[in-house]
Every structure is written in structure tokens, then in C-alpha cells.
Image (cartoon, rainbow, N blue to C red):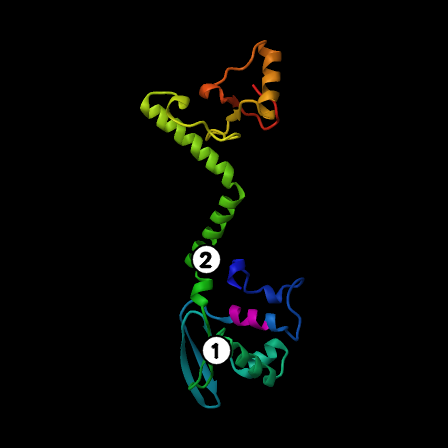
Amino acid sequence: MSEHGYIALARGILDHHVVGARKPYSEFEAWAWLLFEATYKPRRITVTNGRTREVLELRRGQLSHSRSYTAKAWGWSEKRVRGFLLRLEKNQQIDRQTGHLQTVISICNYERYQSPETSKGRQKVPQTDRQRAGKGPEEEERNQVTQVIKDSTRAGGTENEKKQKPRHGARTKDGKRIWFDFGTMEWNAYAAEYRQTHFEDPSVQWKGTGSWFNYFPTGDHG
């Protein structure tokens, strides 16, 4: 389930006048209700049963409600609530602690999925992967071009004297220059336009294998 990532939902979404839940709740809505009811920070609650009173210490990710209260909130019978909670426990989605006036429910992996720090960390990784997958070849080309320029400048020479030629279609880091291999369709198209404005063939770098040209996304070359 976690491979699809995470989103933040307002705790009051189930009561929204347009998209809110209607009773009886579905099992998904009942599960969401448990997540929303879990406390996000440690706190104390007072539980009473007749004349008996007990103070419960709830930790982050825990909640405690009577079965009758939960059944009313969900629009379910108490028997159905009991069965659903048992299924969640068997599936290791919740853990129940008895021995109190009122059962304490712990959401399993609450810290892992609800912690802002963890969510940020988890979100960054998939985004980086998608960015790398979406423009991998282009990014590699730019890195290659940048390294060529750095190495050439450091050595006091030109690109074609110090490194192998860039990959066809590679661009400089600022995106203003693009490399065309000699004899390709792109090269020929550029050369034709160049001849019309300069009345000569464009210069060839890298021992006649290609050259850098100004890059314009609109297709107009300068």
C-alpha cells in the first residue's frame, strides 16, 4: 500500500458537507475515522464507568473510545464494530490494550506514516526518482557537456582537444547551446538556414564530427 506514496487529509473531512461520509460508514471510512481520532501528541483522558474513574495516558497514535460511542459514530452495531476491530488487529493495522476501563487502540506504524519528518523524507525519494527517470538522458547529456567544459577550461584548451565529442543533441548547462553531429538531419537543417543568412557553411568543430549551435526551443537558430 505504501508504494503509492502519502497525502495529507484534514481531520474533519468525514464531516464535510459535500464530500463527507454518510452513515453507516464504509470500512474505509471507519478506518479513516480511527486515524483521525488518534492523538497526534501525548495527552491524558478521563474514562468513567459508573462511579469508577480512570485517567489514561495516550501516546501519539493512540485513541480510546467506548464501543457504544464508536458504533454510534459509524452508524454500526456494536457487534460489527467488534468484528471489524478484530480483523484490523489480525491484519496488524491496530493493536488493542485491555486491562483498563476502556480499551486503548494503537495505530500500527503511525509514526512511520504520519510523522512530518518521515513524510518529507519519503516524498523526496520518489520525486527524485521520477525526475531522474523523466529527463535522464537529457540530464546525462548536460552533465557530460558541463564536465567537458570544466575539464577543457582547467587544462587551458578547447573541448575538442581535451575530450571526446558530446552526444548528439547534448546541451550546455544553461540550455543555450546544442550539439549536432555532422551530417544529421538537424545539422543539415541548421546549415541550410546558416547559409541563407551568412552565405557560407557553418564551422565544424571536433575534427569535423560536429559543432555547437545556439539553441532556440521555437526552432529558430541563431
Report the Cα–Cα distance between label 1 and label 2: 25 Å
Query: Could you tell me which residue is drawn at 62 percent across and 12 percent down?
Result: 196
User: Total number of numbered labels?
Assistant: 2
Q: Which residues are magenta?
A: 30-36
Q: Nearer the viewer, residue 176 or 6?
A: 176
Locate residue 204 relative to residue 58 in the image: left or right. Answer: right
Instruction: Name the residue that disc number 1 marks.
Output: 64
- Residue 173 position (above or below residue 61): above
Q: Residues within 10 Å of mark 2 (few under 14, many from 20)?
A: some
Residue at disc 1, secondary structure: loop
Task: Say if the magenta span includes residue 35.
Answer: yes
Label 2 amino acid? Ser
Prevalent SS, magenta region: helix
The vertical placement of 195 against 10, above or below, is: above
The answer to if 191 sits in the magenta stretch is no
Q: Which residue is mark 2?
A: 119
Vertical relation: 146 (above or below) 70: above
Task: Residue type at mark 1: give it.
Answer: Ser
Q: Quadrant of residue 215?
A: top right
Q: Measuring from the top left, give residue 89's x and y in whole percent.
A: 50, 78
Q: Quick one: quadrant of the C terminus?
A: top right
